[in-house]
Amino acid sequence: MSAPLGQFSDIVHPAVARDIAGWTGAHPLAPLRETLRSHQRDRTFLDLLAEAIIARTLLAEGCALTREAPTPEGRGCDFRVVADDQSFYVHVKRLVTDGTDRQVTISARLRLLERIMRPYIVSVRWRDGVDDRQMQRLVREAEEFIRHARVGDELVVHDDADGSEIGGVLIVAPWDRPHVSVMIGLPEGFADETIRMRRLLARAWRQFMPRARNVIILATSHERDAADMDAALLGSHEERWDRFPPRGSRIAHGRAEDGFWNGDQREDSRWAGWFRFDPAAPDLHVRLWFRDAAGEASPFGRLLRRVLHADGASAAPGPP
């Protein structure tokens, strides 16, 4: 039996490949299957595979799909979806994000930073091969920095012996706990994919079907990209001195005006999703964002969570 997805079959989970292989004959996604089978360029194949993974999930939930539904402006939506007598359009975009997932040995010294009583998510990075003395210096300077820094501030720590860079610390965002939450950054720097994500969101928006429900779904390489997706949609985290801080806090936090959904921009975009693209995974888990709380609680919001196997959802905050 020939490989169901051509030369790339060995990188796709067998269950996913088997389901796609069944899209034959009069199946509405038979052309997508044939395109996947015949493609020689890995990047284009993977872009199409991201679409196929979304389609497979929707089909499993009983949705009826039409691929490449044309808009009046001559553009195309990836899928028209009908489920429970409701229709909507899905636009799938894939972004290859920087860096590689790696196993890292987390020094016990870093746990000291999580005892600092400041409500921030803090990313800490260090170069490969640092010794215990250098890690101790990094943690010592990081602790002092975190106690006084604000959202968006960054520290670079150098070795006092030879001046080489040991690592760095970035105050990423506010956090709903009273103490620091530590994230691990990349040795070569802190990745921020929000600008590229906003460009992809805007590209999908230009392909919207007018006067219809349109859902944008981004697929990226790493779990940490969910935070960048959140910032791309809602705006970068920042300290807001024009707001009253919540009870028990001295500082108010808000969002910058760089979000895809900022203000009344692109009012026809109400729903967006993100998932980690992993061809070897058997299942899809989408995180959803809703433009407002009413949309999240609506029957359509509940439908989206079901058919996209959403394991997380959040609504954009209202005006201050």
Image (spheres, rainbow, N blue to C red):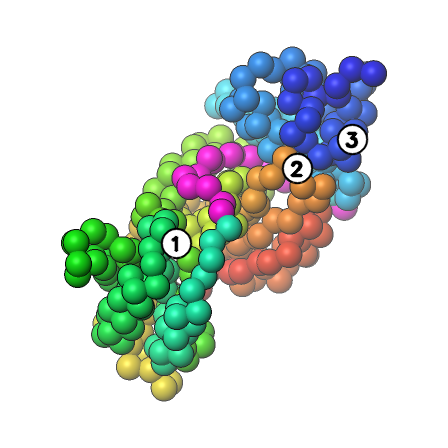
Q: Check disc 3: other Cα within 10 Å, few if <14, some if 14-19, many if 20+.
A: some
Residue 54: where, in percent of width, then height?
65, 37
Between 167 and 3, the one nearer to me in the picture: 167
Quarter-wise, where is residue 139 in the image?
Answer: bottom left
- Left or right, 262 with respect to 25, comes to left
Residue 185's tag is 1
Between 3 and 257, the one nearer to me in the picture: 3
Q: Is residue 201 above or below residue 271?
A: above
Label whose residue precedes the other's in the sequence (3 or 2):
3
- Left or right, 168 with respect to 30, comes to left
Q: Secondary structure at mark 1?
A: loop
Q: Pointer 2: what residue?
A: 280
For image coordinates 42% across by 41% down, the residue present is 99
Label 3–label 2 contact, CB within 8 A: no
The span picked out in magenta is 84-102
Q: Check disc 1: other Cα within 10 Å, few if <14, some if 14-19, many if 20+.
A: many
Q: Is residue 101 magenta?
A: yes
